[in-house]
Amino acid sequence: MKSLCSRILLFAWPVIILSGCLSGGGSEVTSQDNPVLIRRAYRQRVTSPATRTQAIREGLHSPDPLIRRNALYEIITERGVDGLAEFEHLTRDQDPLVQGLMLDFVKTIGDPQLRTRLAKDIAAHSTDPAVQKAVNNMISTFQYYRQNKRLKDDPTWDHEIETIQTMTLPDDTWKILADPTENGHEKKFFAVDYDDSAWKPIKVGGWEQQGLPQYDGVAWYRITFTAPAKGQANAAELHFGAVDEVAWVWLNGVYVSQHDLGPEGWDIPFVMDITPEIKWGEKNLLVVRVHDSAQQGGIWKPITLHVLK
């Protein structure tokens, strides 16, 4: 698996048998001075609907890193970015696994400005080289951003959705150009009237075996395809098999959206609605800006147009 770091949240509660006295000392064990009892009490409160919310809020400020990690996991799972105000202070946490969990959460934030601010805060308070590297990769990526809503996510659409046609885009008529200075957007590489006659041909697959050996960085892809007639279509989507590793997409010169999960997104399929941008029954220009930070890179699985009714 291609990943800068893979972190699994392990929150195992110790199970012990207490006899009521510490061996050798003879003093009574109380919940105030025994971390195991404190964690057990927290676990009981967080699993009870009546006390769960307050237990999580208090757990986020616990001096015990095990409790902080669990409380962070619980609130991220329940509320995501909506609960950020309650746990943003943990970007400054010194516990490595709290840092890792915060970083994994920050990678999922769509707003690039918020994502960058939180990532920089984590890096400023961490001495872990893996965290520093992950943050550097994250904040160096392209800052274009646009939300993309699919028909199935439209609350005003109350009809059954049916795929009435699919069309796989050609895999052998792409063109590519490396962009080591990362300023292709300033040169309008995405524009319909941009002259790409000097670009190199490439097929769907990793770019390292197709003219860009050992290249890590940004490259741009362009392809022209003819869309089917509209007919009874209500929407159109592009289904990307996988892009290694981050992708920004334009159709007919209009920015559509992004697939930006950092290095972890290299093999994850994604879908973008292109209904406003597609030209039914005509030629369409698809442009994809790809950023790769290590190993293989590029559009390495097919892209399919789905016509929805």
Image (cartoon, rainbow, N blue to C red):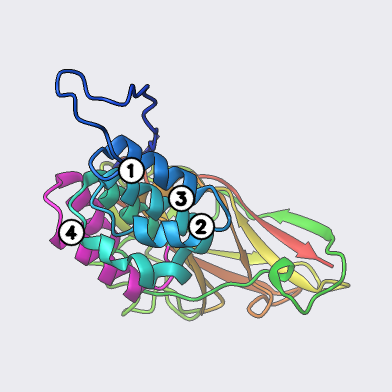
Q: Are marks 1 and 2 in contact (CB under 8 Å)?
A: no
Disc marking residue 202:
3
Q: In terms of secondary structure, where does tag 1 sit?
A: helix
Q: Which of labels 1 and 3 is toward the front?
A: 1
Q: Amino acid at mark 3?
A: Ile
Q: Which residue is mark 4?
A: 123
For the residues labelled 4 and 2, the Cα–Cα distance comes to 34 Å
- Of mark 3 and mark 2, the one earlier in the sequence is 2
Residue 154 higher or lower than 167, as above or below: below
Q: Crowdedness of circle 1 by 10 Å Cα count: few (<14), some, many (20+)? A: some
CA distance separating discs 1 and 3? 60 Å
Q: Is residue 179 left or right of residue 286?
A: left
On the question of residue 96 being in view, the answer is: yes
37 relative position to 136: left or right: right
Relative placement, left or right, of 291 versus 237 is left
Q: Give the residue type at disc 1.
A: Ile
Total residue callouts: 4
Residue position marked by numbered label 2 in the rendering: 51
Kindly indicate the quadrant of the structure image that contains residue 14.
top left
Residue at horizontal 33 percent and vertical 43 percent from the top = 38
Q: Secondary structure at mark 3?
A: strand
The C terminus lies in which quarter of the figure? bottom right
Q: Please state the horizontal and vertical placement of residue 90, each as a whole percent of the image.
A: 27, 60
- Residue at 88% x, 72% y is 232
Pair 3/2: label in front? 2
* Residue range of the region highlighted in magenta in the rendering: 109-138
- Whether pointer 4 and pointer 2 mark residues with C-beta atoms closer than 8 Å, the reply is no
Front position in the image: 139 or 176 = 139
Residue 26 to residue 245: above or below: above
Q: Is residue 296 magenta?
A: no
Q: Earlier in the sequence, mark 4 or mark 2?
A: 2
